[in-house]
Amino acid sequence: MRSYPYFARGEDIAGSILRQNEDGTLEIRFHGPPDYETDAVAFRIRLLTHNDEISFRRLGELFDDPGISEEWRDEYERWAGGLHMHMGQTYAEGPKGILTYRKAFEMELHGHRGHYKSTGDAFKLYRLWVTDDSERQMLEDAFHRVLIWVVYAGQNLAAASRKELSLASTT
């Protein structure tokens, strides 16, 4: 996945710049990859965030396996636990309520980008929180952050798992 065009921007995949115009008004400009690049990554990482065979949740089922090393358990807690903590942090708070990064991710993936149902919770939440272009851009910026967090955690947990498998094959 690292070879995807989405990651070609290095550390500047997406973000925003806030500046004050000559007339004193504030302007925020968002930048990020085109939707087709984002979708290519987003639809792949669903494997890690949903209940698929290689998801973080399913890998967590190995935690209690007596054949798993303490080192792998520590790495799992570090990366999957860190991701879980980030996802639970508040992304936005205001008259509409409190929105975590997890909910923002679900709204964008299941309420806007992916296959969604107009009766689904993610779609309803998206319609509540996204009422203009600036709100859409802010949500998309949060979505990019989550994509990067998931890929980063996934790569590190994959490395720990490869190491675990190589240790298991030598015993």
Image (cartoon, rainbow, N blue to C red):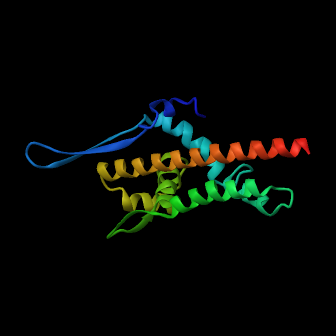
Q: How many marks?
A: 0
Q: Quadrant of the N terminus?
A: top right
Residue furthest to the right: 171
Q: Is residue 86 above or below residue 14?
A: below
Q: Is residue 30 above or below residue 110?
A: above
Q: Nearer the viewer, residue 137 or 26?
A: 26
Q: Quadrant of the C terminus?
A: top right
Q: Nearer the viewer, residue 45 or 136?
A: 45
Relative horizontal placement of residue 27, taking residue 3 as reference (left or right): left
Relative horizontal placement of residue 28, taking residue 76 as reference (left or right): left
Please provide percent x and percent y for residue 90. Answer: 43, 64
Relative horizontal placement of residue 134, taking residue 55 as reference (left or right): left
Residue drawn at x 40%, y 52% is 139
Residue drawn at x 76%, y 42% is 162
Residue 34 visible to an observer of this rendering? yes
Q: Nearer the viewer, residue 51 or 82?
A: 82
Please provide percent x and percent y for residue 159. Answer: 69, 42
Task: Residue 167: name its quadrant.
Answer: top right
Please provide percent x and percent y for residue 133. Answer: 30, 48
Residue drawn at x 52%, y 56% is 106
Residue drawn at x 65%, y 54% is 50
Residue 120 visible to an observer of this rendering? no
Please provide percent x and percent y for residue 13. Answer: 43, 37
Relative horizontal placement of residue 78, taking residue 85 as reference (left or right): right
